Amino acid sequence: MPRPRKYADTVVKSFSIEREVYTRLKTALAAQGKSISEEVNTLLQKRLAELEGFEASARNNEDYEALKSQHLKLVEEVNRLTKLLEKDGVYESLMGFAYEQGLDLTDLHNVEEIAAKILQKGRENLDQNIRTSHIHLFITLLEKGKQKKAIERKLTQIRLKAALT
């Protein structure tokens, strides 16, 4: 049975994209829970608005709504990963170790550096009940947390700017 169409009135067209661009974009969008079709549709809508002379506020509103949606998904994912690690009794130990390695909890700007340290030093410095899968789940949690904090900064800027106007 074919999947139902995302949009009520669609046109199926084919076009060419460089393979590497497609692969990287598909991976990046999948992490956000979006499809290539959704992204192309959004980009075409924005471009059409530019060509037709619509003001930027309409586009900004779409961006704002997309940010809110991404933020919600990231909050849910961060909570889900945290609960998984807490359920297995390893969250506090992993967080403590990451903090000892220099994790900056304010904006998580050094997640990549800390992830490398956890992978290099973690096995010998962590509790024996922490499995490799726990370490990778924790690193994923840190990466998602970093994305969430970046979106929160953008949302704060947008909302403060809106309050001033």
Image (cartoon, grey):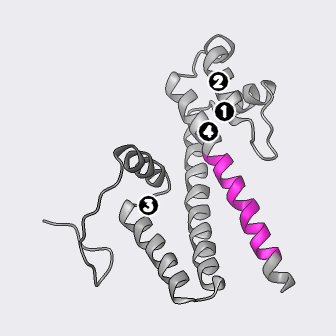
The image's mark for residue 112 is 1
Q: CA distance from mark 1 to mark 3?
A: 24 Å
- Reading the image, the residue beneath label 3 is 34
Q: Are marks 3 and 4 in contact (CB under 8 Å)?
A: no
Instruction: Of the two numbered discs 1 and 3 on the same chain, state the one appearing first in sequence.
Output: 3
> Looking at the picture, which amino acid does disc 3 mark?
Lys
Position of 105 relative to 94 (above/below):
below
Please rate how many residues cluster around mark 3, counting C-alpha atoms within 10 Å: few if below 14, some from 14 to 19, many from 20: some
Instruction: Of the two numbered discs 1 and 4 on the same chain, state the one appearing first in sequence.
Output: 4
> Would residue 103 be found to the left or right of residue 134 on screen?
right
Quadrant assignment, res 94: top right
> Which residue shows up at 13% across the image and 65% down it?
1
Q: CA distance from mark 2 to mark 1?
A: 6 Å
> Which residue shows up at 57% across the image and 39% down it?
140
> Looking at the picture, which amino acid does disc 1 mark?
Glu
Instruction: Of the two numbered discs 3 and 4 on the same chain, state the one appearing first in sequence.
Output: 3
Camera-nearest label, 3 or 4: 3
20 or 125: nearer the viewer: 20
- Reading the image, the residue beneath label 2 is 116
| Horizontal and vertical percent position of residue 141 | 60, 41
Q: Is residue 22 magenta?
A: no
> Would residue 44 be found to the left or right of residue 131 on screen?
left
Quadrant assignment, res 88: top right
Q: Secondary structure at mark 4?
A: helix
Q: CA distance from mark 4 to mark 2?
A: 22 Å
- Reading the image, the residue beneath label 4 is 86
Position of 66 relative to 93 (above/below):
below
Q: Which residues are magenta?
A: 144-160
Q: Are marks 2 and 1 in contact (CB under 8 Å)?
A: yes
> Looking at the picture, which amino acid does disc 2 mark?
Ala
